[in-house]
Amino acid sequence: MDKYLLVSSPMRTGSTLLYNFFRTFPGDYIVKKYHISPMKPQSYDYFVTLRRHPAACISSYLHMMDHEYTEKNIRESFDKTKEEFDWIEELDQSGRSFPIRYEDFYNNHFYIRDFADKHFQIYVNDNQVYDFSSEYSWYNVMLKSKKEGEHMFQKNHISKHLGRNELHIEQLRNTGIMYKELKELSERFGYEY
């Protein structure tokens, strides 16, 4: 029976980078990117569930979509993000889920390599990590995002803040919009706001 490794995440958590890592180094798995869906996972599926500061996810999404930081847009993005984080919590209850935080692998592809080895017995040597890091540098991802492909990067995939949480969070916090809700959601998932 085929074993699936489903890279599962809320929006803007680094899932496309992880998907490409596991697509490049699949081990014994069939690798898919899995987004919130009514489809029920099978008992032989394994999940990589991603986390990132929820406020950074929301701000990064607004940048990617080229949306203004209005109350309406922030509310819609907040509701979507909250729903997706709730879904990840459900997957984590399956016993076949392996969580990883964006903050741990952002700019550290060796962390991804060690994670893959520890949880999925996928061995990747140092030279392969260097090659992957070069292939998926910020600059190369910006180039890849200009055209569709198996890589799944989208237009505007790299935000103007280049993935730096602190700038996304600061920009969202400075609006003063939904401060209490954003603080509660962030703290629920172990982040300060």
Image (tube, rainbow, N blue to C red):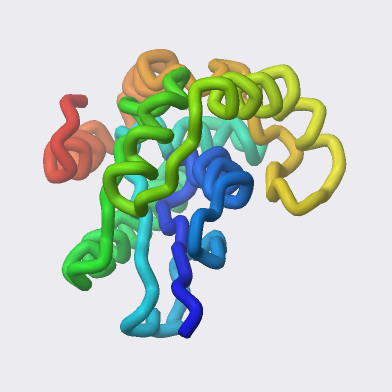
User: Residue at 55% across / 41% down in the picture?
Assistant: 21
Does 103 sit above or below residue 77? above
User: Residue at 35% across / 53% down in the picture?
Assistant: 120
Q: Is residue 182 left or right of residue 128?
A: left
Judged from this view, the residue extending furthest toward the right is 147
User: Residue at 62% across / 18% down in the picture?
Assistant: 160
Residue 7 in sight in this render: yes
User: Residue at 33% across / 26% down in the picture?
Assistant: 103
- State which quadrant residue 16 falls in: top right
Query: Which image quarter is the C terminus in?
Result: top left
Q: Is residue 25 left or right of residue 168?
A: right
Residue 45 image offset from top left, x and y in percent: 38, 74
Q: How many marks?
A: 0
- State which quadrant residue 135 falls in: top right
Q: Is residue 59 left or right of residue 134?
A: left
Residue 81 image offset from top left, x and y in percent: 38, 51
Nearest the eye: 193 or 105: 105
Residue 126 image offset from top left, x and y in percent: 50, 22
